[in-house]
Image (cartoon, rainbow, N blue to C red):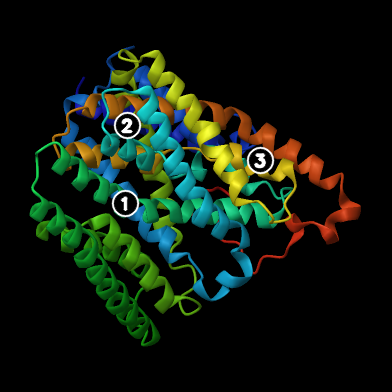
Amino acid sequence: MNSAYSLAILAAILLVYALVSKRLASTFLTGPLLFVAFGLLMGSKVLGIIQMESDPRTVDILLEATLVLVLFGDAMAINAKAWRKEAYIPERLLGIGLPFTIIFGFVAALLLFGEFDIWEAALVGAILAPTDAALGQAVISNPRVPLSVRHGLNVESGLNDGIVFPLVMLLLAATLEAEGASTTGNALWFIFKTIAISTVAGIAVGWIGGKLTVYCDRRSWLDSIWRQIAVLALAGLSYGLVTPFGGSGFISAWVAGFTFGLVVRDRLADISDFPDALGQLLVMISFFVFGNAILGQALGDMTWEVVLYAALSLTVVRIVPVAVSMVRSGTKWPTVLYMGWFGPRGLASIVFAVIIIEEGDLLHIPLIIGVMAATVGMSVLAHGVTAWWGSNHYAAWYEGRSEEHHLMAESKPVAAFVNRRRIQP
């Protein structure tokens, strides 16, 4: 179909969703679920109206641009000064739960897929470890849920993709070397330029950009609208500056966002409003693209092993590590189960898989993409359907123990709660 018609159809879908978005927020019809469904429906496997798989480079650019903006904004929102007061749940989820999730995912992949070597299995475990709170907005935004729990899941989702990405690149380098596509020297240089160069560039862009923004704003040189556009420019600069030299634009974007946030925090109000809105738009379009160009193609090649791995990834691989991370934390088992179940997989996993396709010619790319597509697709459905219902049932349990609130770890005060771009308040 003509590209103009395709654009018109996508714009119409966005318009309809925008008009009823607040009403849908209290139902099981989440944004990611609807956009994946529409993408799948319009794709070549169903109606054949929009076929994005025929233009893979456009798909790659869109997904990568979305993750860059998400990483920059998530890192920018981190309040390092308040971390000690509000980190008792996210530090457990990230410091204990995340490594165990990767390990469990690695073991499951090694057991189910005999064609994987240890590096490919580890790569799958890492790709599917980050969570995406956008898939279950009510889990984070329902005010009846204890603030500490909402904050913990929100911070975990905002940080784990930035933490996991360097590991994904390390495992990719090791996999390429094991398969003979790279030498040890090349792999070590690949690791160095991916992490070191990207980190230095990110710090430079974030610090200089933050200082210039504050300086110009104090002298009234900076228009309020262009102040927010400057954030987008810095996110793009942090990515584009290192990519030609072989560095990782994603690591650079996360580091730049964190550094920029340290410099401008409490000095520039509402500087991220427009980037947040644009980020949410791009995330929804990305889920449409996922349904249209990736999930639709992968459904025809699904095996029982792939489906079983996806189910395990969303249950045992996630819930058990969360339970381990919460040992001796004082949290009750309904809270542990709530946080364990609501660890949806989304945008980061999609983009990581796309990067692997671009960076190296691995032996089992189709299987890796299939596992990712099945897991994210199942997560979009399962977590979308259960988010509103689950958050209300958990909230009802918590409210029913009001006499114990002063003793419960769930009632611990949190210094600040920031809704990141993928979460509607």
Q: CA distance from mark 2 to mark 1?
A: 26 Å
Q: Is 415 drawn above or below residue 403 in the view shown?
A: below
At 16% from the left and 61% from the top, the residue drawn is: 193
Disc 2 to disc 1: CB gap under 8 Å: no
Question: Quarter of the image containing the N terminus?
Answer: top left
Q: Give the foreground label among 3 and 2.
A: 3
Q: Is residue 317 above or below residue 367?
A: below
**220 displayed left or right of 341:** left
* Image location of residue 260, percent across then percent down: 37, 72
Q: Which residue is mark 2?
A: 289
Report the residue marked by disc 3. Answer: 338
The amino acid pointed to by label 1 is: Leu
Mark 3 surroundings within 10 Å by alpha-carbon count, few (fewer than 14), some (14 through 19), many (20 or more):
some
Q: Nearer the viewer, residue 394 or 231?
A: 394
Figure disc tally: 3
Instruction: Choose mark 1 or mark 3, whichever is in front.
Output: 1
**Please, what is the three-letter code of the amino acid marked with disc 2?**
Val
Residue 167, labelled with which disc?
Answer: 1
Q: Using the rendered image of the protein, determine whether residue 198 is visible from the camera's viewpoint.
A: yes
Residue 24 image offset from top left, x and y in percent: 59, 34
User: Which callout, 1 or 3, points at the residue further toward the start of the chain?
Assistant: 1
Q: Residue at x 29, y 73 (%)?
A: 203
* Residue 155 place in picture, x, y as percent: 53, 56
Q: Toward the viewer: 53 or 151?
A: 151
Q: Residue at x 51, y 78 (%)?
A: 266
Could you say where residue 147 lies in the image, as x and y percent from the top left? Answer: 69, 56
Task: Categorize mark 2 by other alpha carbons within 10 Å: few (<14), some (14-19), many (20+).
Answer: many
Q: Is residue 332 left or right of residue 180?
A: right
- Mark 1 is surrounded, within 10 Å at the Cα level, by few (under 14), some (14 to 19) or many (20 or more) other residues, namely some
- Look at the numbered disc 1 and give the secondary structure of its residue: helix
Q: Which residue is at 9% across, 53% downward?
A: 186
